[in-house]
Image (cartoon, helix red, strand yellow):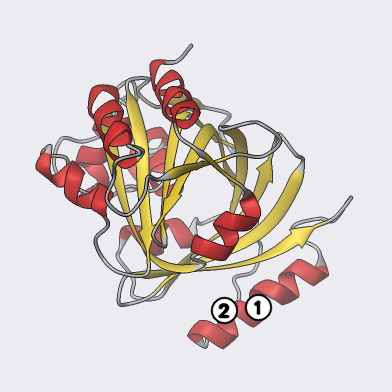
Amino acid sequence: MNPAVRAIGRAALAAHPISLDEVNARAELLARYDNSYLVPVEIFDDLAALLTDPRRASGPFRALSIGGKRWFSYHSTYYDTPELLTYHHHRQGRRLRYRIRERVYQDSGERQFEIKLKSGRGETVKHRQRLEGDDCVLDAARQGFLAGVLRGSYGIEAPGGLTTALVTEYQRATFVADGQRITCDAGLVVRDVATGRSVAADSGLVLVETKTQGHLTEADRVLHRYGVRAAEFTKYCGGFAALRPELGVNRWARAVRVAFPRAAGVPSGR
């Protein structure tokens, strides 16, 4: 088994469980601040042990459990224009930027259409709509939902000509406490729909994302003590930067080289 997948599974099984309803009640965090970290497995093991320790002063972090499972398979399809408008807006650090995706929770079959906005203050706001049956992500209902979100939040029109751009697959364990949520992803594989090329993330790394309504969580502070700093990294932008560095990598170059060491052509500088 992939060492990072084994690590998140080991941590999730060692923690006390928490149900999805409890997670949504305590830390749904559709509007939150995110930090992403590329964490070596050895450091992740220590982080997980500290956070899930029953002796933690305010109680241990608990692991999301659904139907007895503690880690889950995710499949996401990202949508963009043929010119990759949303990719370039992120690359350029535009103040009003967003990503559009369909997320499939493969263990349950649940599907969500999601729009993730990034505000000028660095806050992430997620809008989502459940997909039923044969609902198509690019049908009139979803186009209307997208247009309403972008017009209402940013005062801009939705882009035309959306098409599938990138597919990601990975395993996730989620830990929750004190209004904080920490997602731990492993076994990431990204595929460029246009070219068919794919690349896998380093099997010795766990992608840890801290999510809170404040700015720094306990996990952030622990990782900082280990010398691990937040990375300029998202699965969509990092994946495309690894697969098509000619698009422009900019400030993501270091994180992309760490996350995808087998990707060719990623420049060493900005």
Residue 263 in picture, x, y percent from top left: 34, 25
Foreground of the two, 170 or 95: 170
Residue at the (48%, 66%) spot, across then down: 98
Q: Residues within 10 Å of mark 2 (few under 14, many from 20)?
A: some
Residue at the (35%, 41%) spot, across then down: 208
Foreground of the two, 164 or 50: 50
Residue at the (49%, 56%) spot, across then down: 84
| Marks 1 & 2, CB-CB < 8 Å contact | yes
Residue 147, numbered circle:
1
Number of callouts in the render?
2
**Is residue 205 in view from this perspective?**
yes
The residue that disc 2 covers is: 150
Residue at the (26%, 66%) spot, across then down: 215
Q: Secondary structure at mark 2?
A: helix
Q: Is residue 242 above or below residue 148?
A: above
Q: Secondary structure at mark 1?
A: helix
Q: Is residue 88 above or below residue 170?
A: below
Residue 232 in picture, x, y percent from top left: 27, 50
Q: Is residue 58 left or right of residue 254?
A: right
Q: Is residue 228 above or below residue 261?
A: below
Identity of the amino acid at label 1?
Ala
Residue 112 in picture, x, y percent from top left: 69, 55
Question: Looking at this rendering, what residue extends furthest in the right direction?
Answer: 133
**Is residue 81 in view from this perspective?**
no
Residue 174, numbered circle:
none
Foreground of the two, 226 or 190: 226
Identity of the amino acid at label 2?
Leu
Q: Residues within 10 Å of mark 1 (few under 14, many from 20)?
A: some
Q: CA distance from mark 1 to mark 2?
A: 5 Å
Q: Is residue 2 left or right of residue 79?
A: left
